[in-house]
Image (cartoon, rainbow, N blue to C red):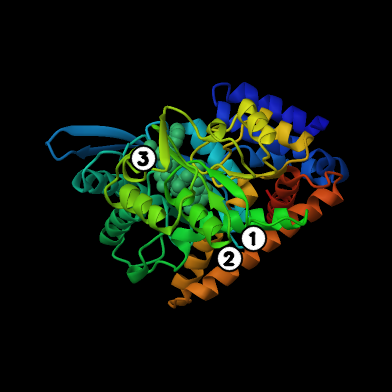
Amino acid sequence: MNAYGKRIYEDVVVKNPDQVEFLQAVKEVLESLAPVLDRNARYEQHAILERMVIPERIIIFQVPWINQEGKVIVNKGYRVQFNSAIGPYKGGLRFHPSVNLSILKFLGFEQIFKNSLTTLPMGGAKGGSNFDPKGRSDIDVMRFCQSFMRELYRHVGPDCDVPAGDIGVGSREIGYLFGQYKRIVNAHEGVLTGKNMNWGGSLIRPQATGFGNVYFMREMLHTRGEDVAGKIAVVSGSGNVAQYTIKKVIELGGKVISVSDSSGSIIDQDGIDDEKLEFIMELKNVRRGRISEYAGKFKSAKYVAGQKPWQLVDKIDLALPSATQNELELDDIKYMVSKGCICVSEGANMPSTPAAVNYMLSNGILFGPGKAANAGGVATSGLEMSQNSLRMSWTAEEVDQKLQRIMTNIHKSCIEAADTYGFKGNYVAGANIAGFLKVADAMVDQGI
Ligand code: NDP
């Protein structure tokens, strides 16, 4: 870090001592920015870092609701509106028992740079609740979502803040949230993305994060004359991002040999084909069951309870972590590299620990940080916003082409920014710098 970055980081540590994930995200960005801050004194003069590390607004609210047994339950709701320099706040909602301010601030902070990288006009935000939809009936989920929106509606809107899904928030939850918003404000408008196709959603939005991550990985591989075809890939998670990551790897001729959930991992040496993927989608999206069922259905698979997939395989070329933060540690990457891994691309947000990232960067492993590699999701949310404003919808081919173009451009911006500031081949620094510059310049333009 340069002196300015260091001063700001130390201040953030003093003021947020318990926010481990937020500190991790801030540290990484400030380290990358050292040469940028050295060369551009005006960012310090305008106190850009001071303003960037504090959310413009945080809303915390109670979410009381009555479950189907008639019991009153109270959850905590959040919306962290981090930065609106380049567009309305935009970022997902996460419903998971682990949700707290540190996690939402790390996600909201990262979202600022990710959204900037897409080149679309979107500011950074994140929100959610410690509510756990897992194992809950549709009635319980609907009642919770309605209560959540009963407060959130006054803070969001198509030109102000447009939330989307994240862990625990899929099309069912978006539907209930949207229905309640519409009821309260009496307007059918684009306040959320990830909507169903027949009432304002965009084709390819469900696929976009996973597809985009594989497109990004393909770009990285091309820089070394490699391709996805013929490679063995390990994927974690079995939710939205994991499912469409698997689909695209298969389409491009790769072989995916793992999936997981928070209870354990499946290793299938024969590879996951379309039929097996369909089983996973029905299991996770419709029946909302556990991934262990896969091993009962397909004899080529084994299930390992309580473990992540990384160290359960004998041969691996590519890794696509697609579950949650800090799920890939130093030992995991060392093991995978010893088994042939050449490229890691993050579908999840911040899934690799700092030690794992440093190891990849110092050992020539191609590493696509989530901020760049999984930006296809929010980019397509941006395309959904455009279609809502235009009151029209584009075909799947049109959206997929735009998504591919966006991922190629993000890859190019990362490479160029890294080259310009002396971090050749380092996508972490490249993404942080390219994302930062646009937002910082907008903040300077708009005054204090
Ligand atoms: P889903 O809720 O659809 O799926 C999450 C998956 O991760 C599930 O398999 C879940 O297992 C597993 N998981 C969740 N928490 C943990 C944990 N603590 N330990 C182990 N496994 C866990 O979420 P998404 O697929 O949408 O999101 C996955 C990741 O991708 C997140 O990091 C998210 O922030 C990121 N992301 C998502 C985008 C999107 O468009 N959806 C966009 C950009 C990033 P289980 O079923 O047991 O809960």
Mark 2 Cα within 10 Å, few/some/many (few <14, many 20+)?
Answer: many
Residue drawn at (52%, 53%) of the image = 245
Residues at marks 1 and 2 touching, judged by CB atoms closer than 8 Å: yes
* Vertical arrangement, residue 142 with respect to residue 251, above or below: above
Judging by the rendered image, the residue that carries numbered circle 1 is 407
Of the pair 277 and 47, the residue shown nearer to us: 277
Judging by the rendered image, the residue that carries numbered circle 2 is 403
Query: For residue 392, what is the image quadrant?
Result: bottom left
Q: CA distance from mark 1 to mark 2?
A: 6 Å
Residue 416 seen: yes
Residue drawn at (65%, 41%) of the image = 51
Image x and y of residue 385, in percent: 48, 66
Ligand 1 positioned in quadrant: top left
Q: Is residue 342 left or right of residue 102?
A: right
Judging by the rendered image, the residue that carries numbered circle 3 is 295
Q: Earlier in the sequence, mark 2 or mark 3?
A: 3
Mark 1, mark 3: which one is toward the viewer? 3
Of the pair 136 and 63, the residue shown nearer to us: 136
Residue 56 seen: no
* Vertical arrangement, residue 106 with respect to residue 406, above or below: above
Mark 3 Cα within 10 Å, few/some/many (few <14, many 20+)?
Answer: some
Quarter of the image that includes the N terminus: top right
Kind of residue at badge 2: Leu
Residue drawn at (15%, 33%) of the image = 71
Image x and y of residue 93, in percent: 43, 46
Residues at marks 2 and 3 touching, judged by CB atoms closer than 8 Å: no
Residues at marks 1 and 3 touching, judged by CB atoms closer than 8 Å: no
Q: CA distance from mark 2 to mark 3?
A: 34 Å
Kind of residue at badge 1: Met
Mark 2, mark 3: which one is toward the viewer? 3
Assign a secondary structure to mark 2: helix
Kind of residue at badge 3: Ala
